Amino acid sequence: MPGYAFPARDVRTDLLRDAGEPPGVRYGLAVGDAIVRDAVWRCPELPDHMAFAWFRHPEVVLDHWCEEEEETFVHPRDPYERVDPIPSSRHVVVEIGWQVVADTRHAVLLFETGLPTRDHIPPDDVRFDLLEPTETHTRCPYEGVASHWAFAPCGSPMRRES
């Protein structure tokens, strides 16, 4: 099963309790007054990274596991074969020539195997007064039909090349 590992510097080590055998490799996780045994470990394949047990563990370790704002169930998605649209609250700003064309905290990030992550921005967060439609439309079995737009600074008409 796939899993997640995080840089140790990003982990709240104040909540970890060394399991001792071998030292500094496996940890219990302090949850209130209880300690969940073997909930965290250092990854030998990824030095300076730590992984968390959150599926197939005899005890409940984490209440929820989220990727961006979407809860992930059962186990992590396969990172080698994926087409996952994940809602995000990241601040995404698109600028062209010092003009803000889009500004949102409601993007949907598209994670697709072998491609860079793409930000899909809601139409309400796009300045269409700075864009003009083109004749280009593309189709995708996952994303549907996309209409393409061209930047038209200050509302000036775009030059079209033949």
Image: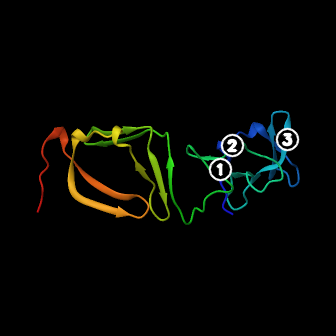
Which residue lies under the disc numbered 1?
6
| Nearer the camera: disc 2 or disc 3 | 3
Quadrant position of residue 77: bottom right
Residue in front for this viewpoint, 89 or 38: 89
Which residue lies under the disc numbered 2?
11
Q: Which of disc 3 and disc 2 is earlier in sequence?
A: 2
Residue 153, horizontal then vertical, whole percent: 19, 41
Gap between marks 2 and 1, in whole Å?
A: 7 Å
Q: Which of disc 1 and disc 3 is earlier in sequence?
A: 1
The secondary element bearing badge 3 is classed as: strand
Give the residue at the far right of this rendering.
Answer: 21
Residue 98's disc number: none
Circle 2/circle 1 CB separation < 8 Å = yes
Gap between marks 2 and 3, in whole Å?
A: 17 Å
Amino acid beneath label 2:
Val
Whether residue 90 sits left or right of residue 1 in the image: it is: left
Quarter of the image with the N terminus in it:
bottom right
Which residue lies under the disc numbered 3?
35
Whether residue 40 sits left or right of residue 152 in the image: it is: right
Task: Please name the residue shown 48% across and 40% down the image.
Answer: 90
Gap between marks 3 and 1, in whole Å?
A: 21 Å
Residue 101, horizontal then vertical, whole percent: 29, 40
